[in-house]
């Protein structure tokens, strides 16, 4: 995830019970692009012991191939193509989710990428741009070009991040392509991951925002699958997670207000499960410095509440990004 899946965040997640693999923030590919250094750093230095796929966003075939050659010199598990980003500034350039309007272009691009990638080639897509009119054609192209794994975010591009997820469409993808399919979109808890595995037939689940809120989600799902008691973090442990975010994700060289701004972006998600009335979110958003912000965290997560269990699910009615739950797209 853009601005989220940094080296530091991967390290933090790795310590909480990492998923089976990670996907990087997307590398933007155009005429004059070179792989962004901070994303390369996340591939080289995440230290989780888990495989990492490098994700690309672009449509210019020769430059996609050039970038793939360069990324294949790094220790990546494979190359992933983004066909889902819904930000207008992205899809208007016919990249990310914009590609879903143009099966002929997707045919050309997948063909060229397949040729350039001797190892694992994966695709992440939504179910369509504004509707599912090209979904079957796109799934047929995934099969034609022998994509090794497909992740389906069960929304259209126009559905952004909050329309209802169409899990039946994901089940349809599972039946339509020969490769494994990973389901994505609002997989909020280990229980839901279990239920959706049965319902969709998907080979796995991808968690995005829910892993920011609950970095133990992968561990919890693994425990559920193995019939083990599920780890239940306390609010005190959530406070310790926040401290790790400060240390790993907030550049200490930045001014305290900037560090607070960075941390708030993560806390917008964490805060969805701190209290039902949204007091934590309200207070933390009004702080200015890192010290004030951590003071609010202490007040809500430590003291008498430190041993309370952090709920699996967000409280209903709370919104993570009030100013960004609009047409902004893939940015924290
Ligand atoms: C801040 C943010 C950044 C994202 N960046 C990317 C990205 O770079 N590549 C990508 O494939 N998806 C990206 N996504 C989409 C997520 O990977 C995921 O598909 C989507 O949020 C739905 O899953 P969730 O309900 O588990 O979050 C981003 C989402 C958010 C909220």
Image: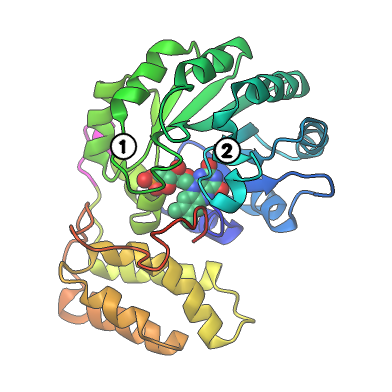
Q: Which mark is residue 98?
A: 2
Location of residue 39 in the rendering, given as x and y in whole percent from the top left corner:
67, 53
Q: Residue at x 38, y 48 (%)?
A: 161
Q: Which mark is residue 165?
A: 1
Number of residues whose C-alpha sits closer than 10 Å to that of mark 2, classed few (under 14), some (14–19) or many (20 or more): many
Sooner in the amino-acid sequence: mark 1 or mark 2:
2
- In magenta stretch: residue 221: no
Q: Residue at x 44, y 68 (%)?
A: 265
198 to the left or right of 139:
left
Q: Secondary structure at mark 2?
A: helix
Point out the stretch of residues depicted in magenta: 222-230
Number of residues whose C-alpha sits closer than 10 Å to that of mark 1, classed few (under 14), some (14–19) or many (20 or more): some
The answer for how far apart the CA atoms under marks 1 and 2 are is 19 Å
- In magenta stretch: residue 224: yes
Q: Nearer the viewer, residue 232 or 145?
A: 145
Counting labels gives 2
Q: Nearer the viewer, residue 75 or 178?
A: 178
């Amino acid at each position: 995830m853009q601005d989220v899946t940094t080296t530091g965040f991967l390290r933090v997640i790795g310590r909480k019970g990492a998923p089976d693999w990670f996907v990087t923030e997307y590398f933007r590919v155009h005429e004059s692009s070179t792989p962004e250094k901070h994303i390369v750093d996340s591939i080289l230095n995440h230290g989780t012991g888990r495989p990492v796929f490098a994700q690309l966003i672009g449509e210019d075939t020769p430059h996609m191939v050039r970038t793939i050659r360069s990324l294949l010199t790094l220790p990546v598990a494979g190359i992933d193509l983004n066909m889902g980003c819904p930000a207008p500034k992205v899809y208007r350039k016919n990249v990310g989710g914009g590609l879903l309007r143009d099966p002929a272009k997707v045919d050309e691009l997948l063909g060229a990428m397949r040729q350039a990638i001797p190892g694992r080639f994966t695709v992440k897509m939504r179910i369509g741009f504004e509707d599912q009119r090209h979904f079957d054609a796109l799934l047929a192209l995934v099969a034609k070009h022998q994509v090794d794994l497909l992740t389906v975010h069960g929304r259209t591009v126009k559905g952004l991040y909050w329309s209802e997820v169409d899990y039946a469409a994901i089940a349809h993808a599972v039946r339509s392509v020969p490769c494994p399919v990973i389901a994505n979109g609002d997989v909020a808890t280990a229980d839901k991951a279990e239920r959706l595995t049965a319902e969709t037939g998907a080979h796995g689940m991808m968690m995005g925002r829910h892993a920011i809120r609950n970095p133990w989600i992968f561990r919890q799902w693994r425990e559920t699958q193995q019939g083990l008691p599920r780890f239940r973090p306390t609010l005190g442990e959530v406070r310790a997670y926040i401290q790790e975010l400060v240390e790993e994700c907030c550049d200490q060289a930045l001014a305290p207000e900037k560090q607070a701004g960075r941390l708030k972006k993560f806390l917008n998600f964490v805060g969805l499960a701190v209290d039902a009335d949204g007091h934590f979110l309200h207070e933390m958003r009004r702080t200015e410095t890192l010290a004030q912000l951590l003071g609010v965290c202490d007040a809500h997560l430590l003291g008498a509440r430190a041993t309370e269990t952090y709920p699996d699910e967000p409280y209903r009615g709370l919104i993570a990004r009030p100013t960004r739950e609009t047409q902004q797209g893939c940015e924290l």
